[in-house]
Image (cartoon, rainbow, N blue to C red):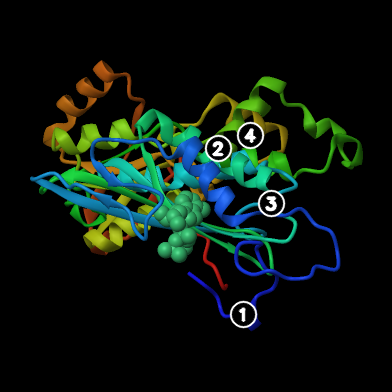
Amino acid sequence: MQPSRQRLPYIFTSMASTVRTKARPTIREFDLIRALHRRHGRRAPSVIQGIGDDAAVITSRAGQWTVLTTDLLTEGVHFDLRTATMSDIGFRAAAANLSDVAAMGGTPQYLLVALAIPRTGTRQHVLQLYRGMMAACRPHRVRLIGGDTSASGDGWFISVTLVGMVPHRKALFRSGARIGDLLYVTGTIGDALAGLRLLNEPPPRARRHPRTGALSARHRQFLIDRHLHPTARVAEGQWLSALHLATSAIDISDGLSGDLRHICEESHVGVDLDLGALPLSPACVAYATSRHLDPVDLALTGGEDYELLFTASARQRPRLERTALERGFSLTRIGKIHPFRFGIQAVSSHGRRHRLPNTSYEHFT
Ligand code: ADP
Ligand code: MG
């Protein structure tokens, strides 16, 4: 899309010729797109037209629904270039979208990426960003089929759109939880928040109490990696959908407490959450101990773990737990669905019961 001339903060070389007073790294828009096409625009039989025309054209298969999701990442709001590389940012952007498709029980297929690049952005930055994105996509054979490129007057904007499919009537929605269902979560939660906090901590020498830094290098690396390189639970979502095991599902992007609330609201049910059962990694527990925090708080409020939170009918429990074991999926039962009037309650490991506060992150507040 061509922006109006007068509003342009600065101009890409392909858009217009300008006299520049200051030297700065130049990005040639069409060279850049060609490079992205060459590196990442791999062909697939279902792609009739990928990068290189006005729009991409794909074939759709009979008996499939199309799943679509998009995410916008803004520099300073969603990422900080002082603590993450462009490749890390790309990986996380793609993983967030893959996770959305996973939570619908779908198979991710095609990627579109729109970029606004600031003055300070270079061709290398963009290539690194795509390297990260495609690294997250590669295991799922997701194809890059298009995007858009613009200049930005203020920081990076990265919009990632993912297209996928799911067989008719097999999509998993937030609205399907029923009274009596069991609540499950994949993997471990709280790790990504611990990793983010570690990245944002001042270096040990600047800290007032250096002794609180006692955390093994291995745990530290694990947590940071969980933040920078989350795994979307695509295979788990497909399994839940294909075997009709789940009644509802969501991915944990805002934190368990907030995302569980979404299931309850959309399904018009209440829930009893067992805090003592929450799956915590040894690294998350070690981090919490070293910082005098409760790891359960990290697990409740920490977003961006990209684990799947889902409900299943109690009747399915044996089949669910057996097939998870067979496939090597890590799964924990953490609660039970109640009538709406029950509300959202949690029981601590000491048996103390309370209402769960809403801690999800909201923009503009
Ligand atoms: P248009 O003017 O029709 O928007 P563009 O010149 O922006 O066309 O894009 C040309 C082709 O390059 C299209 O296929 C578009 O999808 C693709 N493309 C543009 N920017 C990107 C990008 N950042 N990543 C991937 N593909 C891109
Ligand atoms: Mg365009």
Front-lying residue, 78 or 159: 159
Name, please, the residue furthest toward the front: 17
Rounded to the nearest angstrom, the CA distance separating label 4 from label 1 is 42 Å
Residue 83 figure quarter: top right
Point out the tag, 4 or 1, that comes first from the N-terminus. 1
The CA distance from mark 1 to mark 3 is 30 Å
Instruction: Locate residue 336 relative to residue 23 in the image: left or right.
Output: left
- Mark pair 3, 2: CA separation: 16 Å
**Circle 1/circle 3 CB separation < 8 Å:** no
Q: CA distance from mark 3 to mark 4?
A: 14 Å
Q: Going by the picture, which residue comes out furthest to the left?
A: 63
- Disc 4 versus disc 2: nearer the observer: 2
| Residue 132, numbered circle | 2
**Mark 1 neighbour class, 10 Å CA radius: few under 14, some 14 to 19, many 20 or more:** few
Dividing the picture into quadrants, the one containing residue 240 is top left
* Amino acid type indicated by mark 1: Arg
Which residue is identified by label 4?
224
Precedes in sequence: disc 2 or disc 1: 1
Task: Report helix, strand or loop for mark 3.
Answer: loop
Residue 80 - label: 3
> In x, y percent, where is residue 282?
56, 24
